[in-house]
Image (cartoon, helix red, strand yellow):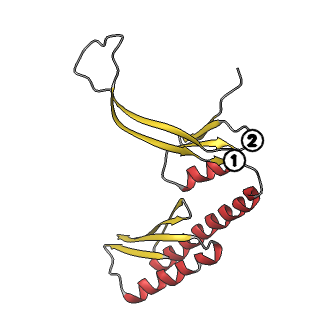
Amino acid sequence: MQVSITGRHVDLTEPLKAYVDDKLQHLKHSFDHVVDVHVVLSVEKFRQRCEVSMQASGINIHGSHETEDMYASIDGVVDKLNRQLKRYRAKLRRHRGDPMGREIKVSHKILDMANDKDELTEDHQPETLRHEQIDAKPMSVDEAVMQLELGSRDVLFFTNGQTEQLNAVYRRPDGALSWIEPEVA
């Protein structure tokens, strides 16, 4: 497990680094596929904050905790991450035996809608600024919601394991989650 520690307005002493590293090693007991961990320790007036971003077998997990004591903040964020990893591991166990569908490729294009023309003709096609392929992996709706909450994306496309159709979950501007599923016509 690769651990990097950054300090903002805080001296990164050796005992503090050792404490962070020791606490993060305990996460390996919950989930042994943790690859990369980035820790940011910051102090603003009386608030001492610890933020952790980790990559574990294809998922990104984020957590933060803020108290008046840096060691308590570190303990709090490690507890949160430990709960998230245990929840994720339990869901993997539940879904491991389920036959999932096939993976679907989804095309994602970002279009340039800024145009100097006042009127657009009927045959006008906006210019593509960026184009990328996304793999819509087979998973259940619960797993897709968990991946969306753990990751830093706003939209997640996936192949529904029950229907084998392309579905999407996304975070709405009001903070609620929405699920898009095609209906049979």
Q: At 64% across and 78% down in the image, what residue appears?
A: 29
Of residue 117 and residue 166, the one placed in the foreground of this image is 166
**Quick one: SS at disc 1?**
loop
Count up the numbered dots: 2
Q: At 35% across and 81% down in the image, what residue appears?
A: 12
Crowding around mark 1 (Cα neighbors within 10 Å: few <14, some 14 to 19, many 20+) is many
The C terminus sits in image quarter: top right
Q: At 42% across and 84% down in the image, what residue appears?
A: 16
Whole-percent x, y for residue 48 in the image: 42, 72
Q: Is residue 23 above or below residue 91?
A: below
Whole-percent x, y for residue 131 in the image: 39, 38
Q: Which mark is residue 103?
A: none
Of residue 128 and residue 42, the one placed in the foreground of this image is 128
Q: Which residue is mark 2?
A: 162
Disc 1 marks a residue whose amino acid type is Ser
Of residue 16 and residue 150, the one placed in the foreground of this image is 150
Q: Is residue 145 above or below residue 66?
A: above
Q: Which residue is mark 1?
A: 140
Crowding around mark 2 (Cα neighbors within 10 Å: few <14, some 14 to 19, many 20+) is some
Residue farthest along the bottom direction in this orientation = 15
- State left or right for residue 114 relative to residue 141: left
Are dots 2 and 1 in contact, CB under 8 Å?
A: yes
Of residue 20 and residue 143, the one placed in the foreground of this image is 143
Q: Is residue 77 above or below residue 95?
A: below
